[in-house]
Image: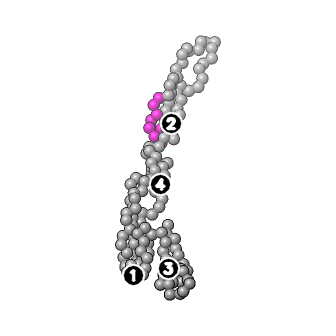
Amino acid sequence: QEWEQCSASCKGGVTFRNRKIKRQATDCGKQASGLSQQHAACNNDVECEPSTDCVFGEWEAWSGCSMACDGVKRRSRTILQAGAGHGKYCIGPLKQTYPCSTGTGLLEFSSPSMYLHLDKLEINNLAGDQPGEPREMRFGEVTEMR
């Protein structure tokens, strides 16, 4: 006989099937052996919650610099859809900060990727006051922001 419907639609249940004796044994025959009902596990590998991947929202624009010297910019994003089941879960920050300054002569990035350590300035010849030397600024330390 066919298996009955599973007792649970997900995360495991039980199903069964029955069998009947078609013909009874005669006095000289052998009696039927075995169980009249068979049980089995079912739907063990079916998730109750569908698998979905995490979806982050876009990063908001960077805020303005919080102070003229040694300030910070901030931005944030939200989770539009959380990961579930066997999907990809959200890994990564929801907020970012970035050092900034708005004082005279300092660089301001609208989408920062490097932080120039102005206290590590090694060469500043932008005025061109050293004849024969190219106009340049060289920093002893640069931090790449990711």
Q: Which residues are magenta?
A: 4-13
Q: Which mark is residue 103?
A: 1
Q: Which residue is mark 4?
A: 89
- Residue at disc 1, secondary structure: loop
Of the image marks 1 and 4, the number of the one nearer the N terminus? 4
User: What residue is drawn where x is 63% and y is 12%?
Assistant: 28
Pointers 3 and 1 in contact (C-beta within 8 Å): no
Q: CA distance from mark 3 to mark 1?
A: 14 Å
Of the image marks 3 and 4, the number of the one nearer the N terminus? 4
The 10 Å Cα crowd at callout 3, few under 14, some 14 to 19, many 20 or more, is few
Q: Closer to the observer: label 1 or label 4? A: 1
Amino acid, disc 2: Cys
Pointers 2 and 3 in contact (C-beta within 8 Å): no
Q: Which residue is mark 2?
A: 42
Say if 52 sits above or below 76 in the image.
above
Amino acid, disc 1: Gly
